[in-house]
Image (cartoon, coloured by chain):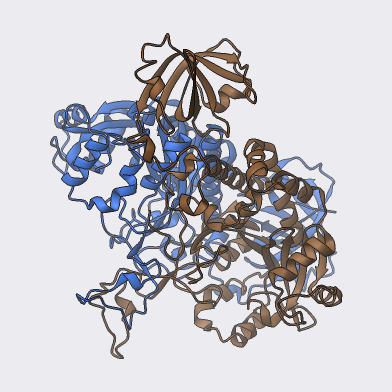
Chain colours: A blue, B brown
Amino acid sequence: MAVVSVQQALAGGIAAGSEVTVRGWVRTRRDSAGLAFVNVSDGSCFDPIQVVATESLANFDNEVKKLSAGCSVIATGTLAASQGKGQKFEIQATSVEVVGWVEDPLTYPMQPKQHTLEYLREFAHLRPRTNLFGAVTRIRHCLAQAIHRFFHEDGFYWVNTPIISTSDAEGAGQMFRISTLDMMNLPRDAKGQVDFSKDFFGKEAFLTVSGQLNVEAFCLALSKVYTFGPTFRAENSNTTRHLAEFWMIEPEIAFADLNDDANLAEKFLKYVFQAVLNERMDDLAFLAERVDKTAITKLETFIAAPFERIDYTDAVSLLQKSGHKFDFPVEWGLDLQTEHERWLTEVHVGRPVVVMNYPEQIKSFYMRLNNDGKTVAAMDVLAPGIGEIIGGSQREERIDVLDARIAQFGLDPEHYTWYRDFRRYGTVPHAGFGLGFERLVVYVCGLSNIRDAIPYPRAPGLATF
Amino acid sequence: MAVVSVQQALAGGIAAGSEVTVRGWVRTRRDSAGLAFVNVSDGSCFDPIQVVATESLANFDNEVKKLSAGCSVIATGTLAASQGKGQKFEIQATSVEVVGWVEDPLTYPMQPKQHTLEYLREFAHLRPRTNLFGAVTRIRHCLAQAIHRFFHEDGFYWVNTPIISTSDAEGAGQMFRISTLDMMNLPRDAKGQVDFSKDFFGKEAFLTVSGQLNVEAFCLALSKVYTFGPTFRAENSNTTRHLAEFWMIEPEIAFADLNDDANLAEKFLKYVFQAVLNERMDDLAFLAERVDKTAITKLETFIAAPFERIDYTDAVSLLQKSGHKFDFPVEWGLDLQTEHERWLTEVHVGRPVVVMNYPEQIKSFYMRLNNDGKTVAAMDVLAPGIGEIIGGSQREERIDVLDARIAQFGLDPEHYTWYRDFRRYGTVPHAGFGLGFERLVVYVCGLSNIRDAIPYPRAPGLATF
């Protein structure tokens, strides 16, 4: 008797007639004369396995016929080709051991019916038992593995940049402060301000908004590096597109310009989407049926198409000449809004687009100033159905230009001493991009709320677990 | 002309006589009559490649002969079997382009000599350019990849548990508070206390100390799950063994007991150590020469030996009868200290040991109470040379016992409502363990200070980047 996962039992690698044991949670039970059909899921794949129990089992009446959704069982029996529709194998049980009952089946929060996503968000500790969140969790895992594998195979090294930061990477504010000071008894300095020299790190500290600046220093030593870790934004916006805590992927490449960056972004996205198609067709099929009918075709189309590249200046012209009525103004010097991005990628090109070389004043200080003096070597990758999915840039490697940009943006040069420092010694052109991991999950799964793309969402009012 | 990494150029996969370009940073330059031997590293592997430049190059006198450690170059030439000792290939340059100079070679902080680790810690943005931190970064990457691969191949799903937490997982205190309240103008409630209902999440929030409780909920849906993410401890201890911010790996398995847990720990450690031996022998050889002469043999021995398992009660007897004089007392009911652990694993057994079933009062509330009523199903994996490397337990799956333990430990049941909740519905025996990723890096690299095992160390006084 071998203990196997439901995935293994269903995959066809175990000969029919073998004695197997599966362990998991009941999804449904259906009774027939002297028989009970119990669907058991262990989360290893989308499908549960059907366990056929007969009245010959000693606990058939007392236990098997009382099983309800959520009960945990260990079922042993013969793996057999199934007569039923939609499943290749079933288990003809010689034993069904009930490990854990459901306290009150009528009030079990994960009833075998469709719950609203709002309802499920209140049960982040139970929602992985549903079809949807099982699928999202497995796809999320598949994406994460593919991301690490892609970079590893391409010669990148993973660098985990600091979560606790004493500088504001983007100069963009909205950071969470971290502290161990007693808030009822704050130390004060001579001016009456909070004396952070008494705090844990001897200075004010925050949660990072990006690992980019830190990983750049490693790029100028190891050439190809990436981060994959959590970042934080204290934006008080209760929207379907923002999380206070989310994971970011930030590769950085040395001896590289914006074109290399765009090439990397294209290769990267296609690799990870291909991995989902290869490995999680079971979950994608469910999502295509219930959540987003393009769940599979969207990825297939994405992989088949070469990305289009458009200069920002040309993009503005195209939008202005489109004849389409947009809510937000289109004008050189203004940032593109989601409606503009989606028109470009969905209507104008019909496949992913990389918009390049944005006006310098709407982008970050660290982006490389182009020779025109008006634009920076920045790019956004836009995908049909979602808009911007990746943002990246070539970094300003010239120390004099960087200094001027820090001054122009009104940033405190003190905070960037180390950041300019590694450019003093063998600086090289380098480039990188960043993307939100949950945004990738939202795109692949066709979710409409980013809070459903992370196991335990953190957003205003959502940190209860 | 193909751009290749130094690793590719040295690996033997490119035919001698091929025209190649490498890009990287100068490590050393040595001159000979009409020749310059420039060692170039790009971080892709331990070894630099020797670029041989002759005076026939147009910029030989003006530039090549002025190259110093840290300068960035693009070198093109013919890949040739090397006459030199210790390297198989070199590049006979037809062009050496200097991309970035070192501002003042005499004050370049990463001189080609051995710096103290204390000195290098002040230059976390430059130390990856040294042999040691290049090696540590690559080994760290290799370990991280092997960890994800091990779990993936074994059917586990990665779950990223929350970093921001509103409950204290271990009931162990020493957490960092996160807040967006204006510290100069804190809102107060009717009792004069800080009114956290006005804070970002509407309640007091902290940085997590462990993802275990959260991942358990996913374990009871997906059977085999793991976390790999940052955790935080605000311990004000300025030691060589503590970091304020570090990464943890926490697998959790359903339908499993403490023996399954110990089996998983053994299989896991052997897998990741084998990966380092397979993939990073270049870096290990350097570490064996400079840092820890057992760097290679230690891992080989570890993998070859089956782990010993000893009951805590027996371990105490063994220690008491050892005749060895310990600094700390040995007595049933007291926790084992590092000196005890190291005696057990190094002197008594001579290989890794799993100590199992500790007294309940010295372990956490969530560990499963054994039938003796005195011990819990907890384990520590001890390794020669370091002591405890993994801590794990079977979790208390019985809701009545868990409730009694929460009360016994004086914990607020309110904080554990959701944690007890998923045991109400199909509870199962489950087990897991946790290990600090940096501790693994310290062990493999033979480092003596954990601050050298993470790219940017966070500890009291160390958060300057």
- Image height check: is B396 above or below B109? below
Instruction: Pick the residue in front: A155 or A217.
Output: A217
Instruction: Pick the residue in front: A289 or A442.
Output: A442
Lateral position of residue A282 relative to residue B276, left or right = left
Instruction: Pick the residue in front: B334 or A153.
Output: B334
Determine which quarter of the picture holds residue A13.
Answer: top right
Question: Residue shown at 42%/53% (left/top)?
Answer: B122
Question: Residue shown at 48%/50% (left/top)?
Answer: B455
User: Where residue A407 sits: x, y (%)?
Assistant: 18, 46
Question: Residue shown at 55%/74% (left/top)?
Answer: A107
User: Where residue B384 sits: x, y (%)?
Assistant: 74, 58
Residue A321 in view in this figure: yes
Residue A84 in view in this figure: no
User: Where residue B374 sits: x, y (%)?
Assistant: 76, 83
- Image height check: is A163 above or below A86? below
Instruction: Pick the residue in front: A314 or B300.
Output: B300
Lateral position of residue A96 relative to residue A364, left or right = right
User: Where residue A99 sits: x, y (%)?
Assistant: 73, 69
Determine which quarter of the picture holds residue B8.
Answer: top right
